[in-house]
Structure formats: C-alpha cells, structure tokens
Amino acid sequence: MTGRQLIGASLRPGMHALLPERLRRMHIGKLLRRLGSIFWMTLGYTFIFSPIIVVAGSSFDGSSLDLRGNSAFLNFPPENFTFEWYTRISSSLYQALWISFSMASIAAACGIVLGVPAALALIRGTFPGRIILGTLFRAPLQIPFIVIGLAFLQAYYEVGALIGLQLRATFAGLVIGHVFVATPYVVGSVGAVLQRFNVSLEEAALSLGASRWRTFKRVTLPIIMPGVLAGGIYAFLVSFGDVTISLFLTGPNINPLPVEIFFALDREFDPTIPAMATIVIVGSGLLLYVIQRLVGIDILLRGGGNG
C-alpha cells in the first residue's frame, strides 16, 4: 500500500470532503498575506520616492517660460518638456557640487583612517577609561549639528586669535568639521563587525609565523571590510548633505552645494535648482551601481568572521 493510500485509509469518513476546503482557505490566506505585503511595500516606496520623482519631473517643465526665459514656478507633470533649465545651471552650482564631493570624499577617507584604529582600541583594548573614550567618540551623533557648527566657529576664531591660523571660510576648516561628525559612523560600523569577529582566525595566522601587521592586512582587514565600507559610505552621505555645520564654516568663495542651494532658494525660486538636484540624484544612482558592481551592496550587511 502506498503512502497516499495509507493516509487516505487513516482518515475518518467525511474528512475527504474537508481537505479541499482547508487547502482552498490556506491558499486564499497565503494570497491575502502576499497581497498585503505588496501593498505596504508599494506604499512605503511611493512615500519615499514621490518627492524625488516630483523634483526630477518638474525640472523638465518649460510651460511657464516667459519672453525673458524666466520662470516663477514649475509644473508636475511637465506640460512642455524641455532641457532649458539644465543648460542654464550656473557655474557656481557646479563649483559647489565639486566642493561638496571633494569635501565629503576627504572627510570619509579621514574618518576611515581615524575610525578603524579607534574601533580596534575600543573593542579589544583593556586600558582605563575605555568606556569614557567610547562615549566621546559617539558624542557627535548625540549633539545637534547646530551646536557643533557654532562650537567649531568659536574654536576657529580662538585659534586665529592665538596663532594667526585662519580656518573659518576655508576648505580645510570645512573638512575638519565634517571629519568630526563622520568618524563616529566608521567607529560604530567597524566596532559592530569586530564584536562578532572570530579571534581564532588571527591566532591561527600568528601561530603559522605571520607578523601582526601581515595578520591584520591579510586576515583582519578583509573580514572587517564590510564595516569599513559601510562606515565610509555613511560618512560620505552625512558630509555631502550637511547644511547646518557648513553654514557656520563657509565663506563667500567656499560654499558646498547644500549651502549654495539654501541661499539660492532663500533669495528667490530658481528653476535650475531642481535640474541640479536631478543631476545629483542620477549621479548618486550611478555611484551606487558602480559600488554594487565592484563590491556588492549586500556585502555591507554581512557579518565578519564569526564562526
């Protein structure tokens, strides 16, 4: 007797008629749960991407162009498709974009250089005051950025008065302020990976004759690399999009893109701003695509070396 016949023989009379009904209900329930998941996922993505779609779409609208080629507003969806606003983006916006990109890249790189050793010391160190030092490294994440910007502004004035070194309204001063807020992201992401690190891998390399530097280079660093990359990306994004700190540290000739956009919209509406924002959105998407092709975004979500 086959397995299906044994199951059928063991069923009581009348249960054969109930099985199709139960299976149908289970199928309907599973279908409803899947539809509910799709609905909430669609709602969430719509909420997130709607502002981006509106800004990008309205940047192609030319229906309100007057005889002077100016516009007081933009329409969405665009009524008269045009690339007019992209051709009118001022050189100051492109210069501000380059300043923001350079500043964020340097801040992220410096954050990695400072954050990786700091995370190693905080997670593996046994020195006195380690907990207090860890709290200090997390402080920039808990202090409002407006307070940080004001503190750096006052500190730059004091440094200038004492030794004559002027850091306010300079590129170096901007980078220093952004490194301060970028480093904790690297410390946190690398520290999370180190807490799950399997130290027996390092012990095996040392027992086989590898030096501590070679062990770090060939064993430790590849394993904690997801945390390093994640922290660097977070640091770059925070620095690139910051307005509050940069407002205190910028000058007439050194404005990052968010500050330049803030001042432009404060004076009057400029239709080239949505066009520049669309360029930044497209550039960010291309950057994420390159990262995905080179290292894979999913590697940022993996743990490191926990066996």
Image (cartoon, rainbow, N blue to C red):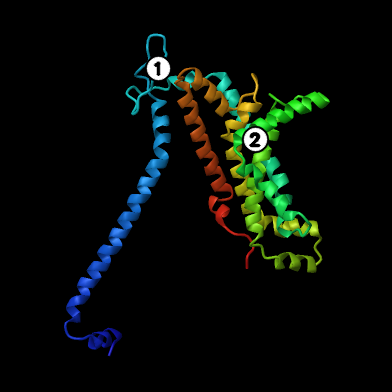
Left or right, residue 203 beside residue 182: right
Looking at the figure, which quarter contains the N terminus? bottom left
Q: Residue furthest bottom?
A: 1
Please identify the residue farthest to the top as the structure is shown. Answer: 67
Name the image quarter holding the C terminus. bottom right
- Residue 185, relative to residue 106: is it above or below? below
Residue type for callout 1 = Ala
**Percent x, y of residue 117:** 74, 51
Structural crowding at the residue carrying mark 2, measured as other residues with C-alpha within 10 Å and reported as few (<14), some (14–19) or many (≥20): some
The circle drawn on residue 72 is: 1
- Residue 83 lies, in percent from the top left, at 42, 22
Q: Which residue is depicted at the point 65% across and 53% down?
A: 190
Q: Amino acid at mark 2?
A: Ile
Q: Pinpoint residue 193: horizontal percent, then vertical percent.
A: 63, 57
Q: Which mark is residue 198?
A: none
Q: Quadrant of residue 215?
A: bottom right
Q: Position of residue 277 (x, y in %)?
A: 49, 29
Residue 148 shows which numbered tag? Answer: 2
Q: Earlier in the sequence, mark 1 or mark 2?
A: 1
Decide if residue 302 is on the left or right side of residue 207. left
Q: Secondary structure at mark 2?
A: helix
Looking at the image, residue 158 lies above or below residue 210: above
Task: Give the camera-side residue of 34 and 219.
Answer: 34
| 1 vs 2, front mark | 2
**Above or below, 246 relative to 47:** above
Distance of label 1 from label 2 (alpha carbons) = 36 Å
For the residue labelled by badge 1, is the local secondary structure a helix, a strand or a loop? loop
Where residue 93 sits, quadrant-wise, is: top right
Viewed as shown, does residue 130 lie left or right of 26?
right
**For mark 1, does the 10 Å Cα neighbourhood hold few (<14), some (14 to 19), or many (20 or more) residues?**
few
